[in-house]
Amino acid sequence: MRRLDRAPLRTYPRLQRLLPCSRSPHATTGEPRASDLRDRVGYTVMFLRMTEKEIRKLAENTPEISRELGTIADQLHAEARDLAGHTKE
């Protein structure tokens, strides 16, 4: 299955404000903390799952494009499943 193209986070300023800062103020190296990465992946999984549900609702109400919306929802579901699997390792 083809992965969704990802736009840089800076194109979504409202979402960017919701995510925690990736840099630890206490880190001397300025490297992102592993817990920050887990948090960001968790937020991304949550966003993908919420978006999948909303697209499926749109597909129910819009029969002329329901097949295309279903395909997009399936891709979002696969992306969320893949990302969620990486956080458990």
Image (cartoon, rainbow, N blue to C red):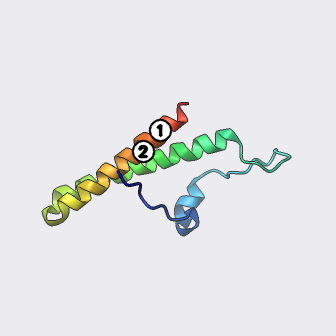
What residue type is disc 1 on? Ala
Residue 74 is situated, as x and y percent measured from the top left of the image, at 30, 49
Which quadrant is home to the C terminus? top right
> Residue at (56%, 66%) from the top-left corner?
13
Looking at the image, residue 77 sits to the left or right of residue 11; the answer is: left
> Gap in Å between the C-alphas at discs 1 and 2?
6 Å
Tag of residue 84 = 1
Secondary structure under the numbered disc 2 in the rendered image: helix
Residue behind mark 2: 80
The reply, left or right, for residue 22 in relation to residue 2 is right
- Inspect the image, locate mark 2, and give the three-letter code of the amino acid beneath it: Ala
- Please tell me which residue is depicted at 58% across the width and 66% down the height of the picture: 10
Q: Secondary structure at mark 1?
A: helix
Residue 5 shows in this picture? yes
Query: Going by the picture, which residue comes out furthest to the left?
Result: 63
Q: Residues within 10 Å of mark 2 (few under 14, many from 20)?
A: many
Do the numbered discs 1 and 2 sit on residues whose CB atoms are within 8 Å?
yes
- Write the residue at 71% across / 42% down: 33
Tell me if I can see residue 53 in this picture: no
User: Which corner quadrant of the image does residue 62 belong to?
Assistant: bottom left
Question: Where 21 falls versus 8 (above or below)?
Answer: above
Expressed as whole percent of the image width and height from the top left, the position of residue 88 reads 53, 31
* Image coords of residue 51 (percent x, y): 37, 54
Mark seen at residue 65? none
Q: Which residue is at the front of the view, 27 or 19?
A: 27
Residue 53 x %, y %: 31, 49
Single out the residue that lies furthest toward the top. 89
Residue in front for this viewpoint, 86 or 25: 86
Judge from the rendering whether residue 85 lies leftward or rightward of residue 72; answer left or right: right
Label 1 neighbour load within 10 Å: few <14, some 14-19, many 20+: some
